[in-house]
Amino acid sequence: MTSLRPPADDGTLRVAVVGATGNVGTAVLRALAEDPRIGSVVGIARRVPRETVPKAEWAAADITDDSADLVGLFAGADAVIHLAWLFQPARYPAVTWRTNVLGSIRVFEAVATAGVPALVYASSVGAYSPGPQDHAVPESWPTHGWPEAAYPREKAYVERVLDAFELRHPGIRVVRLRPGFIFQRAAASEQRRLFAGPLVPGRLVRPGVVPVVPDLPGLRFQALHADDAAEAYRLAVVRPVRGAFNIAAGPVVDPRLLGELLRARVVRLPAAAATAALRALWQLHAVPVPPGLLRTVLRLPLMDTGRAARELGWEPRRTAREALEELLHGLREAAGGPTPPLASAPR
C-alpha cells in the first residue's frame, strides 16, 4: 500500500476521494484544497497522474480488485467521497456492473470497516424513475431507474445497496448527491469519447455547422458546471447533513436552448425515429451509447433543488447554459485535462 501521511491533529479534516481523476473528481480536489477546514486529501484512482494538487496525495487502487487495501487507504479519514464510475464499455454491462455495483459495495464495506464517520456518494438524476417534466420532483421521487440501459439500472441498484448499508450502520452519516449532467471544458475530450465516439468530429458543434436540432418529445434535462458540483461535495463533507440532495442549475436544457447555442433550426422529430436511427448506428458500432440510454434521457424527471439550497447552502455560480457553452468550446478545441481520463488522447 502507498505510504500516506497520518491523520491531521490540528482539527482539520482528512478526506479520501475515490475516483479523483475524472470530470467531477478533479473539480472536487480543487474545491477541497480551497477550504481551510480540509487538512489533507488522498486522491484514489486506478491510474494516478503526475500533477500535484494542494493538500492532496495520490494512491493507486482498483476498487474491483480484492487485494486493494481500501481499508488502509480510508484509515483516519473523516469522510470518503465515492465518485468512481465506469460508463464504458456500454456493450458489456457485466464489465460496468463489476466496477459500478460490486466496486461500490467494496468501497462501502471498507468505509464501515475503517470506521469512517461520513460517506458521500455520487448518485445521479439517472437513478430516478421516469417522471414529470412540467414540474420538479423532490428527493423522495422513486429511484428505480429505467431498465433499458446499464447506467440507470446500476445507479438505481446502488441506491438500494445504500438503503441496506444505512440500516446496518446508522452511525455513519451517508449523503447521496443526485446531480444532473455535469460539464466543464477539461472534460470535453473524455465526454466525446464516452458519448459520441471517434467518428464525430469536434468541429461539428461549431455554431452554424449543425443545420437542425431534433425536438424530441421529452428532451429536457438539467445540467451544471463541474465546479458547482464539486462545491456540493465539499459542503456535504463539512456540513452535518444526511440523505439525498438534488443538484442542478437552471435553465432547463431543451431543444430551443440547444438550437440557440448551435445556431440551428429546431425541427420536431418523433422519439421513435431518433431511437431507430441511434439503434442502427449502435449496431454498426458507429456510436458508443445504446438506444436505451436515449430513451432514459427522454424520461428523466426535472429535479427540485430546494433542499440543497436550504440545508447544504448550495447555489450554482454558473448557469446550465454557461456550463454547456464551456463544453461546446472544449469540444471544438479538443480540450482535455492533466489526468489520464481527461487527456485529449487516451492514455
Image (cartoon, rainbow, N blue to C red):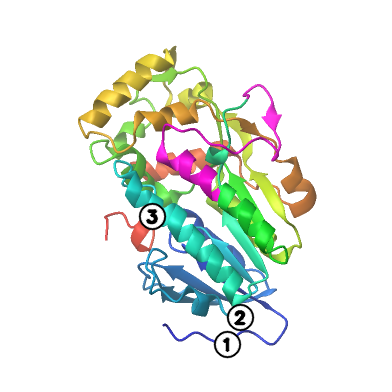
CA gap, disc 3 and disc 2: 27 Å
The disc, 3 or 2, on the residue closer to the chain's N-terminal end is 2
In the rendered structure, find residue 6 and report the number of the disc placed on it: 1
**Amino acid type, callout 3:** Arg
Q: Which residue: 68% across, 30% down?
A: 136
Task: Describe the element under mark 1 as helix, strand or loop.
Answer: loop
- Where does the N terminus fall, quadrant-wise? bottom left
Q: Where the C terminus falls, by quadrant?
A: bottom left
Give the foreground label among 3 and 2.
3
- The magenta region covers 132-158
Instruction: Point out residue 264 in the picture as x, y percentages from the top left corner.
Output: 41, 21
Q: Nearer the viewer, mark 3 or mark 1?
A: 3
Q: What residue type is labelled 2?
A: Gly
Residue type at mark 1 is: Pro
Query: Horizontal placement of 252 versus 189: left or right?
Result: right
Give the residue number, with chain letter if any, for mark 2.
Answer: 76
Residues at circles 3 and 2 in contact by the CB criterion of under 8 Å: no
Cβ atoms at labels 2 and 1 below 8 Å apart: yes
- Placement of 153 over or under 31, stated as above or below: above
Is disc 3 surrounded by few (<14), some (14 to 19) or many (20+) residues within 10 Å?
some
First along the sequence among labels 2 and 1? 1
Name the spot of residue 293 as percent of width and height, x first.
41, 33
**Residue 141 located within the stretch drawn in magenta:** yes
Q: Which of the 4 image quarters holds residue 9?
A: bottom right
Instruction: In the rendered view, tell whether residue 72 sits above or below residue 271.
Output: below
**First in sequence: mark 3 vs mark 1:** 1
**Cα–Cα gap, marks 2 and 1:** 7 Å
